[in-house]
């Protein structure tokens, strides 16, 4: 009888963020599909919900006693995926994730940084701590080459650093029947052309909302486009979506309820194009080869577009309606070319995403 192995997963889980929930779902699914002899424990902000949703054990991410007890029993810590090691959100956030890694090494456990996006890390102390702690880990996989460059600049120089892809590329979208059910429930007509919009609050939200509302009016008047606003972080993104809808005359619909990752992927598959700030809305679109225009507010979004070789983008901090419409029209005119480009990228990234779990299992065997 094979000896059971125990894996602890640390990340931004239990916060009802579609992108991070998708990452966890993919990691758990890949572990379970690869081996029946692995027990998974997740550090979560909402342990009961995480246990129920993913059929794993979950403990409170801030309960230090439970974390210490778990550290004694695990065979490996998986840190990730997502953008955990950055200090744009806060210093507290990066210190938390580094502390969990430090604890695992203190207990002599193997640690894998799993499909992370690294940076920006701006503060000198945070860069120093990241360098010290990550040089002690056993393996690092990264979702983009920019992250590898960031680690190099910080001074992380372990041998086992690999650029793979986001774990979400191993997930499958809900089928067309399920998408139709959601549209009926939400009162969304199955109309075409349908363009997705996935945005979040940002420093210049007022200018952003005004620009997007005017852009939707222009696209509706000139191309007959209809729009579906998709809140990726529920309910936080719902407010800005509603405000955009209220300020445009275009036919606009909002996903008012929260849906799992497969459903959101299925909905995005139905779209003709997506305009998005949220990284994982662009990742979901890439998994379905849906043409996209990226709204860059963070280097991780630009890094992902670069990896796809998608040139259609605008910078949120300096966004102007004319520039945005130009980018959207460019993609619209060459939709089939972008679709072909994304199909090629999708096939490569699916293979790379599977490398994450292969490397994790190799480390777990040691």
Image (cartoon, rainbow, N blue to C red):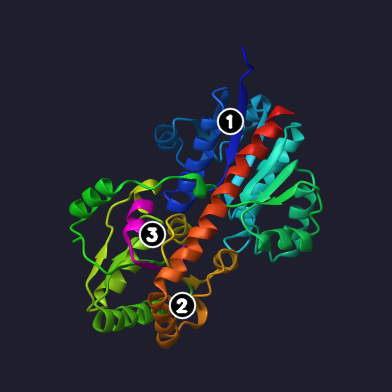
The image quarter in which residue 254 lies:
bottom left
Mark sitting on residue 236 = 3
- Give the magenta-colored segment's residue range: 265-278
Q: Which residue is mark 2?
A: 204
Is 239 positioned to the left or the right of 73 in the image?
A: left
Circles 1 and 2, Cβ within 8 Å, touching? The answer is: no
Query: Which residue is pictured at 30% across the width and 84% down the height?
Result: 218
In the rendering, which numbered label is found on residue 83? none
Task: Identify the residue under disc 1.
Answer: 66
Residue 21 in view of the camera: yes
Residue 249 as seen in the image, left or right of residue 22: left
Q: Is residue 292 visible?
A: no
Counting other residues with Cα less than 10 Å from the Cα at mark 2, is it few (<14), some (14-19), or many (20 or more)? few
Real-space CA distance between mark 3 and mark 1, rounded to the nearest whole angstrom: 30 Å
**Residue closer to the observer: 231 or 48:** 231
Q: Nearer the viewer, residue 286 or 119?
A: 286
Q: Label 3: few (<14), some or many (≥20) within 10 Å?
A: some
Q: Quadrant of the N terminus?
A: top right
Examine the rendered structure and indicate whether residue 66 appears above or below residue 312.
above
């Amino acid at each position: 009888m094979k000896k059971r192995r125990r894996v602890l997963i640390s990340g931004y889980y239990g916060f009802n963020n579609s992108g991070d929930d998708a990452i966890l779902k993919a990691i758990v699914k890949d572990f379970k599909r690869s081996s029946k002899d692995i027990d998974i424990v997740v550090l979560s902000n909402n342990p009961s919900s995480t246990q129920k949703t993913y059929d794993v054990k979950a403990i409170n991410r801030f309960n230090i006693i439970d974390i210490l007890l778990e550290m004694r029993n695990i065979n490996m810590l998986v840190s990730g995926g997502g953008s955990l090691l950055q200090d744009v959100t806060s210093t507290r956030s990066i210190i938390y994730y580094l502390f969990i890694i430090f604890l695992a090494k203190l207990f002599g456990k193997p640690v894998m940084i799993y499909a992370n996006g690294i940076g920006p890390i701006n503060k000198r102390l945070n860069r120093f701590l990241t360098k010290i702690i990550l040089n002690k880990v056993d393996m690092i996989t990264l979702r983009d080459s920019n992250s590898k460059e960031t680690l190099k600049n910080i001074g992380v120089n372990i041998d086992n650093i690999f650029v793979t892809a986001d774990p979400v590329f191993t997930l499958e979208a809900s089928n067309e029947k399920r998408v139709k059910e959601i549209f009926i429930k939400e009162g969304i007509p199955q109309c075409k052309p349908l363009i997705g919009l996935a945005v979040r609050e940002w420093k210049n939200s007022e200018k952003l909302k005004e620009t997007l509302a005017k852009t939707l009016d222009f696209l509706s008047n000139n191309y007959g486009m209809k729009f579906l606003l998709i809140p990726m972080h529920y309910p936080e993104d719902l407010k800005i979506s509603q405000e955009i809808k209220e300020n445009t005359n275009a036919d606009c619909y909002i996903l008012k309820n929260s849906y799992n990752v497969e459903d959101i992927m299925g909905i995005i598959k139905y779209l003709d194009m997506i305009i998005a700030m949220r990284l994982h809305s662009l990742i979901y679109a890439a998994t379905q080869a849906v043409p996209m225009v990226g709204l860059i507010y963070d280097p991780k979004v630009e890094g992902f577009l670069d990896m796809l070789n998608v040139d259609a983008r605008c910078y949120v901090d300096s966004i102007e309606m004319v520039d945005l419409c130009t980018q959207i029209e460019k993609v619209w005119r060459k939709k089939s070319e972008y679709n072909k480009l994304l199909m090629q990228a999708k096939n490569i990234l699916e293979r790379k995403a599977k490398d994450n779990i292969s490397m994790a299992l190799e480390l777990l065997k040691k």
